Image (spheres, helix red, strand yellow):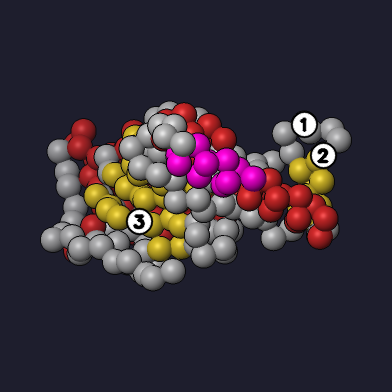
Amino acid sequence: MQDRTITPSTQPLHEPTTPQLIDPLGDGISSVELVRVSGSDVDVVNAARVSFGKTVTELSEQDKKLIAYLMEHDHTSPFEHNQLSFRIKAPIFVARQWMRHRMNSYNEISYRYVKAPLEFYQPKQWRFQDAVNRQASYGAFQDSEVDQTYQHALQTAVQAYETLLAKGVCRELARGVLPVCTYTQFMFTCNLHSLTHFLRLRLHKGAQWEIQQYAKGLLELTLPSFPVSLAAWRNKHGQR
């Protein structure tokens, strides 16, 4: 996949650093792309100190301690005066879990407006259903018969979709035969507070493996812009 870059910000403190694009599922299709950042650790400090009428332009050691204190004691509002926008390409089943996080902004590609590109997530290995936790899986195995069954289902869905369109069926109805492993694209905009809430839940070992990989990608792309805040968050939640 060809790398994409963004236009640098006119404010150096807000300019994202590389990498800008990550393939979280490692299939050459999935992607997490950071497209815009507004804010930095400095803005967190300035939001916290506004009640004293003070501002800074660069962080001191005292400011870093302040950020750590705010994070440790859940003083969350100073972490909300910033914004990050990502372009995401993910299987539909990942996107539906993602959009359960409602304190963010989303815009998604519509397969009413355009023909689906017919890109599908195909696991490199399979997992077993957890017998105790109904929403969890465990382990890993490979099975050529399972692979063939999965691929046959995708081929059948593609054939049905193409046939319906060729027969004049509208896109908004023809898409009904596509599986939830079909890739979708959407814009995801959040602030640092809502992002860390997402990360806390989706980096948890109980989260589905696929969305965990997207959470790791978000964290990697955000770290250069908010290194102090995210270091404090990682320290609080035991993330390394």
Label at residue 119? none
Q: Which amino acid type is shown beneath numbered disc 1?
A: Arg
- 24 drawn magenta: no
Nearest to N terminus: mark 3 or mark 2:
3
- Identify the mark at residue 130; answer none if there is no mark: 2
Label 2 sits on a secondary structure element that is: loop
* Span colored in magenta: 156-166
Q: Which residue is mark 1?
A: 134
Q: Position of residue 99 (x, y in %)?
A: 47, 33
Note whether residue 228 is visible. no
Label 2: few (<14), some (14–19) or many (≥20) C-alpha neighbours in 10 Å: few
- Residue situated in front as seen by the camera: 177 or 105: 177
Q: Are marks 2 and 1 in contact (CB under 8 Å)?
A: yes
Q: Is residue 103 left or right of residue 39?
A: right
SS at badge 1:
loop
Measuring 58% from the left and 46% from the top, which residue is drawn there?
159
Query: In this view of the protein, which residue sits in the foreground, 168 or 150?
Result: 168
Residue at (25% x, 50% y) in the render: 39
Q: Quadrant of residue 1?
A: bottom left
